[in-house]
Amino acid sequence: MDAGSLAMPRRLSPLPPERVPAISNTRLAMVVLIAGESMLFAGLIGMYLVFRLSAATWPPADQPRLPLIVTALNTAVLFASLVPLTRALRTDSTTTRARQVRLTALLGGTFVLVQGIEWTRLVQHGLTLGSSIYGATFYMLIGCHALHVLTGALWVAVTAVLARGDAFEERHPGALEMCGIYWYFVCGLWGVLFPLVYLY
Amino acid sequence: MRAAIMAGGALLCGPAAAFAQSCAMCGSSFSPNDPATRAFTWSIIFLLAVPYTIFGLAAGFVFWSFRRASDRPRATIIPMSWRRRPAAPASGPEEA
C-alpha cells in the first residue's frame, strides 16, 4: 500500500476572484502628483497676477515684447503632440504605439527647443531674470512650465524606447498611461499659461 | 459655563479688527485707489478658489472611478429583523 492510495479525494473550493481596485495605485499617485503640481503653478500664477494687475504698464516700456507668433505656432506643436499620444493610448498594435509615442516625444522636444531658442533671443534683447519684475515673473512662470515640459518630453522619450518591445504588456502595464496623463497635464497647463502671459 | 463661553468669545472677537490689520501686506498697506489692492484681491480670490477646485476634481475623479467599477463585488446588505427570534434550545446533556 503506497501513500497515494491513502490520499482522500478532496473537492477544492474555487479561488476567490482577484480583487481589482477601482483606481490603480499608479493612477492615484498621478492624481496626487498633478494636484501638487497644480498648487505649485497656482502659487506662481497668483504671484504673476499680483504684479500684472498692479503694474501701470505691462510690459514695461523699456523691456522687449514677447514673441507672440512663434510661441503661438509652438503652442500648436505642443497641442498637436496630443494627437499621436491619444492614438498610442488607444491602439492595440505595438508597432503603431511605438511610432506614435516617438512622434509625441519628437513634438515635445521641438516645443522645448523652440522655447530655448526664443529665450536665448530674449536674453540677448535684455530680458533677463534680474532686468525687471517683468522678466522675473516671466522666467519663473514659463521657466517652471518649460522644466515640466522637458521632464515630460524625457519621460515620453524613455517610454518610446520601452514601447519598441512588448514591455508595456508584461512589465510596465501603466507606464504609458501615466506618461500620457502627465503629458496631458503639461499641455493643459500651457493652455492656461499661454493666454495669461502672452495674450493678456 | 455659559459665562466662560461668553468670556472666551469676547476675548476672540474683541481684538479681531486689530488682528486683521496686523498683516503688513493687507488692508492698511495700500490706499483705496491703489491698483495693488485690486491685484491682491484677485490674486487672493484665485488662490482661494484653486485648492477647492483641485480637491473637488481629484475627489470627483476618485468617486467616478469607484462608481464606474460597478462590476466589483460589493458588500451584501442583509435586512435585519427587529423581532427577537426565539432562543435556540440548549444542547446540554439530556436527562434520562
Image (cartoon, coloured by chain):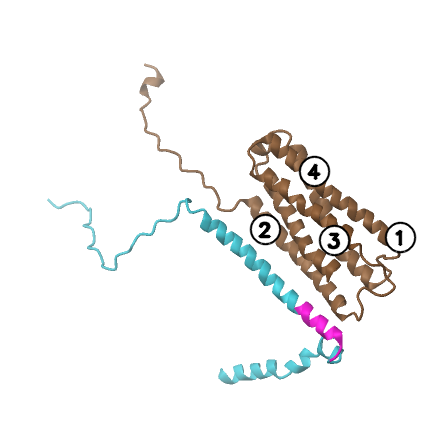
Magenta residues (range): B33-44
Q: Which chain is cyan?
A: B
Point out the residue furthest to the top here: A1
The residue furthest front is A69
Give the mark nearest the N terminus, 4 or 2: 2
Report which residue position mark 2 lands on: A31
Sequence-first disc among 3 and 2? 2
Report the amino acid beneath label 1.
Answer: Gln
| Residue A5: image location, x then y, percent | 32, 18
Residue at x-position 64% and y-position 50%: A185
- Mark 1 or mark 2, whichever is nearer to me: 1
**Which tag, 1 or 4, sits closer to the chain's start?**
1
In the drawing, what numbered circle is on residue A144?
Answer: 3
- Residue that mark 4 sits on: A157
Q: Earlier in the sequence, mark 1 or mark 2?
A: 2
Question: Circle 2 marks a residue in which chain?
Answer: A
Chain to which mark 1 belongs = A
Q: Colour of chain A?
A: brown
Q: Is residue A46 above or below residue A168?
A: below
In which quadrant will I find the N terminus of chain A?
Answer: top left
- What is the C-alpha distance between the residues marked 1 and 3? 20 Å
Asked whether the residues under marks 1 and 3 belong to the same chain, the reply is yes
Q: Earlier in the sequence, mark 3 or mark 4?
A: 3
